[in-house]
Image (cartoon, rainbow, N blue to C red):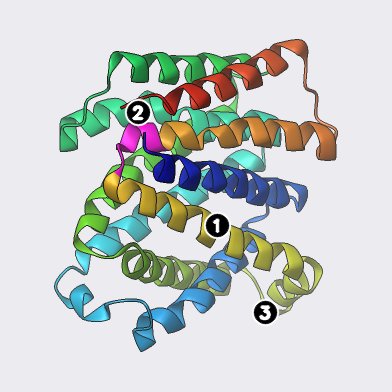
Amino acid sequence: MNGGTYGLMVLSAITHAYWNFLLKRSGGSPAVIGLSKIAEAIILGPLLFTGIGTDPTRLTELWRLPVVGAALVFLNYVFLTAAYRRGELSLVYPISRGAILMFLPPLALLTIGETITALGWVAIGLIVIGIGSVQVPGAIRGTATIYALVAAFTAACYTIWDKQAVQALTPLTYFSAYTVLVGFAYLFILVRTTSMDSALAVWRLERGVIVQVAILNIGSYMLTLMALRSGHASYVIALRQLSIAVGAILGWRLLGEALSPMRQLGVGLVVAGCVLLALVR
């Protein structure tokens, strides 16, 4: 993996882990998620509609790309929110991020013909084993795990879709378009399920978290889209799992969640696999 792509994904992993930490610390309520997605649309919408840094004219021909991308991202957040309401950050986050590697390589092979080298499989294997070691006893049971696994599958699907989409549209054009669509979807849900007074109360209480989550998620996934444009999808997303180690440490240090010796071993294996990816060509 070239140095530029590697650097993009390390930064993406750190920002991704931190916004997940902020979300969990806030309680991970649907209202906070919804307001953060609306905030993302407010931030990126003007770029799309004014054409600053984007190419909206291409969307008239390729509108299906952001529409499908938005649908997959929306589903991912629905399942991720459901998982966080039922489990700890240090349980849900590793499963929802790490299990992507169960689904992405075969999907990439079947859909875009990407293959993985022997060294790449070793690196991914270390990451997967590390993810398994991070889990608490009994973590493979329960509704939190089920929701986290479904979130991982939808993330693998939108990764493949995104890689193809950014070959036709610039990452900023594509990301801005589907972010606006997701924002409208969440606005519709909030209007239907939450009173204006309740939404304003959540905003007043959590506005700092909401804005931070929005900005960090925009930055994190823009970096990923830039890397996906030229990088190998499975390697890019495998490297992004460095966020698992960061998330587990944040949960331990800042949320008081347990980090047993087995989990420490898991974090080490994830880091080792991510370091090994630097050697993959």
Q: Position of residue 145 (x, y in %)?
A: 56, 28
Q: Answer yes or no: is residue 153 visible.
A: no
For the N terminus, the quadrant is top left
Query: Quadrant location of residue 86?
Result: top right
Residue matched to label 2? 103
The label number, if any, that marks residue 114 in the structure image: none
Relative image position of residue 252 (x, y in whole percent): 80, 31
Image height of 221 relative to 274, above or below: below
Q: Which of 152 and 238 lies nearest the eye of the viewer?
A: 238
Q: Residues within 10 Å of mark 1 (few under 14, many from 20)?
A: many
Label drawn at residue 217:
1
Would residue 232 be counted in the magenta stretch? yes
Query: In the structure shown, which secondary structural element does the residue marked by tag 3 occupy?
Result: helix
Could you tell me residue 278's position as x and y percent? 44, 29
Q: Are marks 2 and 1 in contact (CB under 8 Å)?
A: no
Asked whether, in this view, residue 272 is left or right of residue 262, the answer is left
